Amino acid sequence: MGNERDMGLQDKITGRVKQAAGDLLGDEDLRTQGLREERKGQAKEELERANAEADAKAQEVAALERQGAKEKAARARTRAR
């Protein structure tokens, strides 16, 4: 997942360089291309954050399920006595 974040950062930097080059050269197409590339990098970073949040929630749910299973087993052992 870290690779996606790295690619997002790379796209953002490349986009900013293209924007600056477009400004210096008076090339609106290059500037627009740079804006698109920067936005693509931002989107990749947002996706990485969303995936990390989803993974954290999945781990939280798994921990709660394990805890619930342990409690259920303990209740069953208590009843069996």
Image (spheres, rainbow, N blue to C red):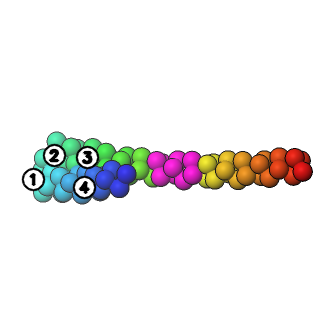
Whole-angstrom CA distance, mark 3 to mark 4, is: 9 Å
Q: Is 70 a magenta residue?
A: no
The nearer-to-camera label among 2 and 3 is 3
The numbered mark, 2 or 3, whose residue comes first in the sequence reads 2
Q: Find residue 30 and name its label.
A: 2
Look at the numbered discs 2 and 3 and tell me whether their residues touch, using CB distance below 8 Å.
Answer: no
Q: Nearer the viewer, residue 56 or 77?
A: 77
Instruction: Name the residue type under label 3.
Output: Glu
Whole-angstrom CA distance, mark 1 to mark 4, is: 22 Å
Q: Nearer the viewer, residue 43 or 64?
A: 64
**Considering the numbered disc 3 on the image, is that residue within a helix, a strand or a loop?**
helix
Decide: few, some or many residues near mark 1? Use Cα within 10 Å; few <14, some 14-19, many ≥20: few
Residue 4 visible to an observer of this rendering: yes
- Image quadrant of residue 33? top left
For image coordinates 30% across by 56% down, the residue present is: 6
**Considering the numbered disc 4 on the image, is that residue within a helix, a strand or a loop?**
helix
The nearer-to-camera label among 1 and 4 is 4
Decide: few, some or many residues near mark 4? Use Cα within 10 Å; few <14, some 14-19, many ≥20: some
Instruction: Name the residue type under label 1.
Output: Leu
**Considering the numbered disc 1 on the image, is that residue within a helix, a strand or a loop?**
helix
Look at the numbered discs 1 and 2 and tell me whether their residues touch, using CB distance below 8 Å.
Answer: yes
